[in-house]
Image (cartoon, rainbow, N blue to C red):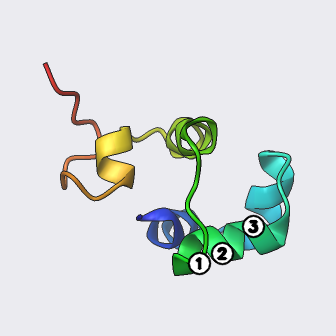
Amino acid sequence: MRLRELRKKRGISQLKLAIDLNMNQNSISRYETGEREADYGTLIAFADYFHVSLDYLLERTDDPTFHAN
């Protein structure tokens, strides 16, 4: 998952992301390291927050705006 890359590109901390999405900073860290897998609702929240497609977030495409037909 491209979570860490997107967060760093935007210049925000794990704590800021956690606060903005009403999550725990420790959970953000675990998602970034792959120690924990995000559920559908969390994946959608990340994609919406960073204005990218789920496919981009999950590294299925390199196009952040990709939408399958």
Q: CA distance from mark 1 to mark 2?
A: 5 Å
- Precedes in sequence: disc 1 or disc 2: 2
- Precedes in sequence: disc 3 or disc 1: 3
From the image, tell me which residue sits under label 1. 35
Q: Residues within 10 Å of mark 2 (few under 14, many from 20)?
A: few
Residue at 38% x, 41% y: name it. 54
Q: Is residue 2 above or below residue 48?
A: below
Q: CA distance from mark 3 to mark 2?
A: 5 Å
Image location (x, y in percent) of residue 17: 74, 58
Q: Amino acid at mark 2?
A: Arg
Judged left or right of residue 57, residue 27 is right
Q: Is residue 44 above or below residue 60?
A: above
Are circles 3 and 2 on residues that touch, CB within 8 Å? Answer: yes
Q: Amino acid at mark 1?
A: Glu
From the image, tell me which residue sits under label 3. 27
Q: Residue furthest left?
A: 69
Image location (x, y in percent) of residue 6: 48, 63
Question: 14 and 38: which one is in front?
Answer: 38
Q: Is residue 14 visible?
A: yes
